[in-house]
Image: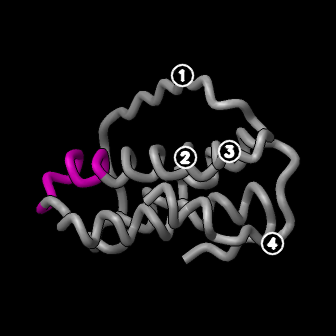
Amino acid sequence: MHVFSTEPRTSPLTNVFELMDHVIKDRLKDLKLEEVSGNIKIVIKTEIPQGAGLGSSAAFGAVLSGCLCQAVTSLTNSEALSVEKFNELVWSYTNVFECMQHGKPSGCDAAVII
């Protein structure tokens, strides 16, 4: 498990790549695999205003985490996650992303999103 600083980063894009790395490595570790081959293309289109207090970072973190969990499962031909396990992972990864974005978030946005 990676250890993240409680200080928010200056670049949201850096946080996105860190989250992607974290989710993929964590899922591979759970599957007892070292790497995955294949391509993942991520396209994000949103109209959620950034910095408006509407939980956009939690929503983005949850969507990205969920997509990556599904992609790793598919690319490794692994057994599908149960709904409970999937939600648990996405909530956990969303909280990691929220910590990267905000330092010490309340956890409310992640809880509401999931």
Residue in the image at 75% along x and 47% along y: 53
Residue 8 colored in magenta in the image: no
Query: Which one is closest to the eye, mark 3 or mark 4?
Result: 3
Residue identified by numbered label 2: 59
**In this rendering, would 22 be left or right of 67?**
right
Highlighted range, magenta? 70-79
Q: Nearer the viewer, residue 100 or 52?
A: 52
Marks 1 and 4 close (CB-CB < 8 Å)? no
In the rendered image, residue 106, in percent from the top left (x then y), is placed at: 71, 71
Compute the Cα span from label 3 to label 1.
16 Å
Name the element at disc 4.
Answer: loop
Residue 54 - label: 3
Marks 1 and 2 close (CB-CB < 8 Å)? no
Residue identified by numbered label 1: 45
Residue identified by numbered label 4: 6
Quarter containing the N terminus: bottom right
Residue in the image at 71% along x and 30% along y: 49
**In this rendering, would 24 be left or right of 48?**
left
Quarter containing the C terminus: bottom left
